[in-house]
Image: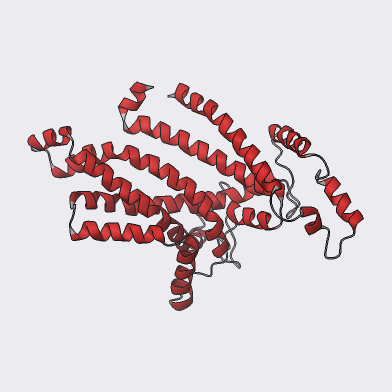
């Protein structure tokens, strides 16, 4: 398994380089000039030229790229023009918020979609099956920003059950001491259950808005995989031995159907990281998505490239984790390695 992980990391290196190359090229194609943006309301040509020189924008593209790669190999992603801080520090400060939101969203999507897929497969063609497929299709078809705004309107504005969509914790509250960067976990570790409650209250609506995008594909894949497994020979043989129904379904059938579900969960998690850009803006969530959107508007090259690179690294890590889980779920994968 360790050899397999090392092999996949080696294969990921060309992918990461391609992401770096494409992100560098695309940021240079963005409309607008960051030097003009940061020169002020009435910039002089001399001021713009000085800023372009300080940002190395006066050099040829290949020199800019070589300089960026050299800095990248030293762990330097550049300095954000918006915050004035190193991009690495900005991303490290905001990444826990994004991971907390995305992780809970994926958990909600799995807890909803797997039971729906299993029930749909067991009751194929029934009213429950049609209702589950209708719900999954509807959830997938609604954009995250629309779902988020609708949830805010209903649960905050009309019913008053949710807190104001103004970040991870109440503006007048005090966050717990930072250990992991995850407010809920830090609150539990510090014994500050008021922060835990406040953090969960602010986390619920954006997590649901984001999770709805992943419920559709996960439900469909779970249902299809369960139908395939339930019609297989070993399940028919197990039924002939009068095995308990719960054991047949949840121990044998569901476990064998989990491989395509795990694959889809990896893609869904990667999609949710990208969809965070919109949801974080709606809920004023201080994650890397809102950071990237602000950087994109200001043509902050270093911040945009840092965001793209961090998402690519997360995607690679998720795929490696899925490969490891494959070996845990199905022994045949370990033997094949």
Q: Residue at x 62, y 33 (%)?
A: 17
Q: Closest to the observer: 183 or 69?
A: 69
Please give the count of numbered marks on the rendered protein. 0
Q: Does 151 sit above or below residue 307?
A: below
Left or right side of 50 for 146: left
52 left or right of 329 in image: right
The residue positioned farthest toward the right in the image shown: 46
Q: Is residue 23 above or below residue 126?
A: above
Q: Which quadrant does the N terminus fall into?
A: top left
| Residue 189 point in image, percent of width and height | 51, 49
Q: Residue at x 80, y 39 (%)?
A: 60
Q: Is residue 320 placed above or below 222 in the rendered structure?
A: above
224 relative to 144 in the view: left or right: left
Residue 133 is situated, as x and y percent measured from the top left of the image, at 28, 57
Q: Please name whichever residue, 147 or 180, is drawn nearer the observer in this view of the structure.
A: 147
Q: Residue at x 31, y 39 (%)?
A: 258
Q: Is residue 185 at all visible to an observer of this figure?
A: no
Q: Position of residue 63 (x, y in %)?
A: 78, 35
In-image side of 235 versus 221 (left or right): left
Residue 316 in sight here: yes
Q: Position of residue 316 (x, y in %)?
A: 51, 36
Looking at the rendered image, the quarter that the C terminus falls into is: top left
Q: Residue furthest bottom?
A: 158
Q: Specify how the rendered protein is coloured.
A: secondary structure
The residue drawn where x is 43% and y is 42% is 266
């Amino acid at each position: 398994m360790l050899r397999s992980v090392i092999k996949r990391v080696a294969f990921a290196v060309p992918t990461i380089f391609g992401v770096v190359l494409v992100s560098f090229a695309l940021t240079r194609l963005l409309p607008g000039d960051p030097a003009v943006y940061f020169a002020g309301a009435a910039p002089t040509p001399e001021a713009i030229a000085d800023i372009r020189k300080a940002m190395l924008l006066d050099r040829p593209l290949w020199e800019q790229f070589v300089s960026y790669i050299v800095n990248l190999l030293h762990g330097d992603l550049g300095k954000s023009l918006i915050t004035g801080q190193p991009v690495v520090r900005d991303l490290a400060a905001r990444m826990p918020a994004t991971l907390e939101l995305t992780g809970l969203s994926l958990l909600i999507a799995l807890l909803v979609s797997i039971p729906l897929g299993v029930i749909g497969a067991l009751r194929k063609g029934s009213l429950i099956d049609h209702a589950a497929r209708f719900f999954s299709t509807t959830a997938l078809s609604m954009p995250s920003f629309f779902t988020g705004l609708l949830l805010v309107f209903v649960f905050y504005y009309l019913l008053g059950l949710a807190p104001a969509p103004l970040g991870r914790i109440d503006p007048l509250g005090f966050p717990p001491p930072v250990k992991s960067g995850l407010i809920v976990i830090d609150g539990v570790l510090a014994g500050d259950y008021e922060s835990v409650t406040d953090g969960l209250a602010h986390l619920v609506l954006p997590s649901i808005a984001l999770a709805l995008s992943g419920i559709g594909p996960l439900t469909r894949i779970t249902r299809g995989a369960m139908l395939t497994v339930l019609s297989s020979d070993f399940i028919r043989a197990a039924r002939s031995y009068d095995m308990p129904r719960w054991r047949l379904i949840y121990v044998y059938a569901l476990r064998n159907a989990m491989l395509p579900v795990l694959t889809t969960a990896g893609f869904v998690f990667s999609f949710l990281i990208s969809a965070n850009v919109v949801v974080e803006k709606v809920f004023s969530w201080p994650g890397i998505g809102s950071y990237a959107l602000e950087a994109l508007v200001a043509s902050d090259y270093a911040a945009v490239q840092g965001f793209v690179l961090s998402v690519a690294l997360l995607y690679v890590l998720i795929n490696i984790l899925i490969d490891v889980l494959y070996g845990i779920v199905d022994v045949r994968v370990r033997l094949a390695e």
